[in-house]
Image (cartoon, grey):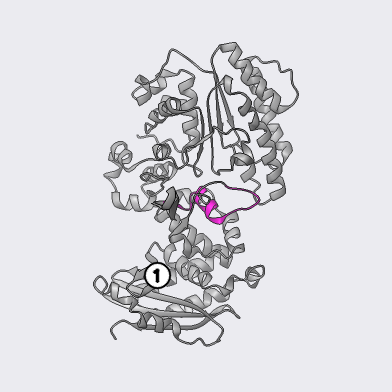
Amino acid sequence: MRKYPIGLQSFESLRNDGYIYIDKTYFVKRLVDEGKYYFLSRPRRFGKSLFVDTLHCAFDGKRHLFKGLYLEDNWDWSRKNPVLKISFGSGVHRSLEELHQTMEAMLNRWARIFGITYSNESIKDRFQETIEFLFVGTGEQVVVLIDEYDKPILDNITKPELAVELREELKNFYSVLKDSDQYLKLVFITGVSKFSKVSLFSGLNNLEDITINKKYSEICGYTQEELERDFAAELSKTDKNKVRDWYNGYSWGNGTVYNPFDILLFFKSMTFRNYWFESGTPSFLLKLMAQNGYPLINLTEVEAGDEIVGSFELEEIDVNTLLFQSGYLTIKRIDEMLDDARTYVLSYPNKEVRMSLNNYLLVYVSRNASAKEKNRIALVKLLKSDDVAGMESLFQSFFASIPHDWFRKNNIAEYEGFYASVFYAYFAALGLDVRVEDSTGRGRLDMAVLFQGHCYIFEFKVVEDAEGSGSALQQIKARGYADKYVAEMDRIYLIGVEFNKSDRSIARFESAVYGD
């Protein structure tokens, strides 16, 4: 029986116990050949810890673990480097004291393993002492591997004062690295978020960020080629294209990859589910989006500059940056602009994330999972029976169910984007083909939904008039938005939806069939 390394972080256990391993060891060689200080950001459950442990085993000289892998014949196994592996991934740090306890435990473990008697009291100084002790004692430069470097901060992102306090303590701890260059062979730092060098790595100016470096874009995750080569038996039992639609699509500038956690769980059960999304719900992220009046419909195509895919700061949290770094958005393409400036076009990576995030948003907004699910099932029935009129009652009911206090601290009800997002979320949560801001010969339509040969074209407007004006449907007709779908669709519905911002309800819901 094939053994899938779900949740395994130990490279040694994985190799000794016969688990499947996708060979990424050529990246180990590349890192050593091309630099010394590296930083890599990837979303959770992407194999960062396993890669860190692979580095550990390579520098520890455990050649037997690399039998049949690239590194077996492309590494100097005659030399070993002392390795300091640091991880903040276990548990939750709820205070500065708990962070200190984790650091103290780490230092005590090093003292036992390496036989160190510390002469300093501070955590920072004992870290420095450890690096120097290993260098002098072995005659070899030290390798420092830091996994989940940012987790104590992210654990407390809803508590800004504590998060800043933890950040400053970590900054003090990491500052040891800038004064230890002569003792260090390699420094590899990884986590989910990317804080600026000023925030956490002050003085470490030679730290190379390989997060969206095309040469390292596939360092974590499985490529399509790797999947078809190493999981041919599993793919032969399922629909390969459906697997790609559901789980492929993550990109950091060059090619696309699958999330290992997702694909391994899928192959184990052969059931399509949102495995990665279920492993951690983005409640803070949705709260932040709500506070900023961020329309979920925008996520189909987000244009961002270097600053958006760059650093994340506690003092000024950007929604797009957080969505990108946490894996809910990914790079779909990079447009080169003038003077080497780039525009990153971000979108959902795949069907799993698009469906799951929209479904979760609906639950978050309504605060009633059972009512949301009832509406979802009803919408499927309405689509199958061509009951467009029934959609009005469905969505009117949903908007009426949104708690009044949801709007209390924002003016989100004034924006078309909010209402459009609710419609979009329902259709996207069903996994349907939803096209937003689709270009036509006479402008961009708000939304088109394609389902079993039928097309539903929506135009949304927020109005003052309690009864609406009919301008939404009129715009669809006047601009000929349906023309581009005539050739491929059997039936096209034109639907104008106008919202009254005073009572946050549907003021007018009009529909027509194209050609009638």
The local secondary structure at tag 1 comes to: helix
Residue 448 falls left or right of residue 102: left
- The answer to whether residue 13 shows anywhere in this view is no
Where 382 falls versus 124 (above or below)? below
- The answer to whether residue 215 shows anywhere in this view is yes
Magenta residues, as a range? 312-331
Q: Which residue is mark 1?
A: 380
Q: Position of residue 374 (x, y in %)?
A: 48, 69
Q: Nearer the viewer, residue 329 or 282?
A: 329
Residue most extreme to the right:
121
Q: Position of residue 388 (x, y in %)?
A: 39, 79
Q: Which residue sits at x=34%, y=69%? A: 450
| Residue 18: quarter of image | top left
Q: Which residue sits at x=60%, y=16%? A: 134
Residue 252 falls left or right of residue 141: left
Q: Position of residue 88 (x, y in %)?
A: 61, 35
The residue under label 1 is which amino acid type? Val
Decide whether residue 313 is among the magenta residues.
Answer: yes
Residue 503 falls left or right of residue 251: right
| Residue 30: quarter of image | top left
Q: Quadrant of the N terminus?
A: top left
Decide whether residue 435 is among the magenta residues.
Answer: no
Where 73 falls versus 452 (above or below)? above
Q: Position of residue 330 (x, y in %)?
A: 44, 51
Where 293 falls versus 103 (above or below)? below
Q: How many marks?
A: 1
Q: Quadrant of the C terminus?
A: bottom left
Q: Which residue sits at x=43%, y=28%? A: 34
